[in-house]
Image (tube, grey):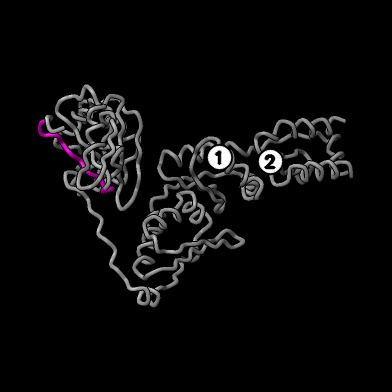
Amino acid sequence: MSQQSNPEIHYGYEPERALVKFQEPIDDFEPLENFTRKRKLENCVLSLEKIFESNAIQVYNINERTTEDCLELYFSCPKWSRGGDVEKIDLKKTEQLIAIVYFMDYRVVANVTRKQTHTLNGNNMTVRVYHAFLGPVDEDFNTSTPHLRLPKPLVKPLERERSIVCEKVTNLKSWETRFLLMNRFIATLNEKFQDLETKIELSKGQRGTIILKGVPQDCTDSKLHIYELLKTAVCRSSSLPPATLNLHQQDQCRKHVMECLKKKELEAVWEVEGEELKVYGNSQKESDAAIKFIGGLVVETKIQVDRKSSQLLTNNHWMQLVTSLSEKHKGLLEIIPKANNTDVAIVSIRELSKSVRCIIRNYISI
């Protein structure tokens, strides 16, 4: 290792990790691994891992009006940014918009970062190489200096017991509760605040209350983390017919949508508000994909009924048929005849639509 001249060393927020970039290629990695296993550094055994040259940049100071499409257009244009073909973009909103832009060719990164200014929608953006191994960092973070976590102040057991408080975060909306759970916030809090007890209580309407038990500073920091996490949610909405929205609110339909999202590997939560279906995700791309996907899971179709057949919708056989289908597919199907029996609306999950339409048509054509 010492034979390599002036290696670059980069650090992230995790004090246990560092990225070392050598000027010359290492032809044989095994001797280097053996060397670090046999010789400790400050009484620690180092673990080495080879990683690829980064093909991504982290972008700061993005105008709030800037979309993923706009960023992709800018960074894929060599004339504007010295960039190239973009593989994907992760756009997140904390206190400001931050994006991680992945290029198809890793060599583009050096060209983009060497360009002195990147201006888009009136904002002078800042770019730096993004190393997935180290994770994202803030704009003012110095990657050339180790980041050391300050030790927690020692508290005597008796003093600590006296200082324990119980605080609550109340009246969380249904989507807020589910968004926090989707992002595994309890595990995150337990990792960051090891002496903090966290639990969540759900009311019948799915409104949540988070109970925090620990020292005052941990409780305050935890609440701040919760509110900051909720601020990152990206909302997309879609207007849907009332009957479709009503079915989306049924427990069985909600469970079905959750299972479909899981199979599709989409992370999002949703809620019906007024005449709209609202979806909340961790990024614009995820929210757009989720609302498009969820919008197609419930379909509404109509079957026209002539005057002669409309009489069939008033007898007991019809009522028994509707009751039987509704009970069999509870919460996944709704059959709605028009007031004058000129048509029948079938609202159901997509998997049921075809078979139910066939049953209704067969009955009407008797």
Does 16 sit left or right of 346 as displayed? left
Considering every residue shown, the one lying at the far front of the view is 38
Q: Tell me which numbered mark, 2 or 1, is placed earlier along the sequence.
A: 1
Residue that sits furthest to the left in the current view: 5
Residue type at mark 2: give it.
Val
The residue that mark 2 highlights is 347
The quarter holding residue 28 reads: top left
Q: Report the amino acid beneath label 1.
A: Ile
Question: How far separated are the C-alphas under marks 2 and 1?
Answer: 14 Å
Report the span colored magenta. Answer: 5-15
User: How many discs mark residues in the rendered view?
Assistant: 2
* Mark drawn on residue 294: 1
Location of the C terminus by quadrant is top right
Q: Where residue 359 sits in the image (x, y, percent)?
A: 79, 33
- Kindly identify the residue that appears in the image at 32 percent across and 28 percent down: 86
Q: Foreground residue, 100 or 10? A: 10
Name the side, left or right, on which 197 lies relative to 240. left
Residue located 17% across and 47% down the image: 145
Is residue 301 or residue 208 the one in the foreground? Answer: 208
- In the depicted structure, whether residue 345 falls above or below residue 87: below
Q: Nearer the viewer, residue 148 or 293?
A: 148
For the residues bearing labels 2 and 1, Cβ distance under 8 angstroms: no
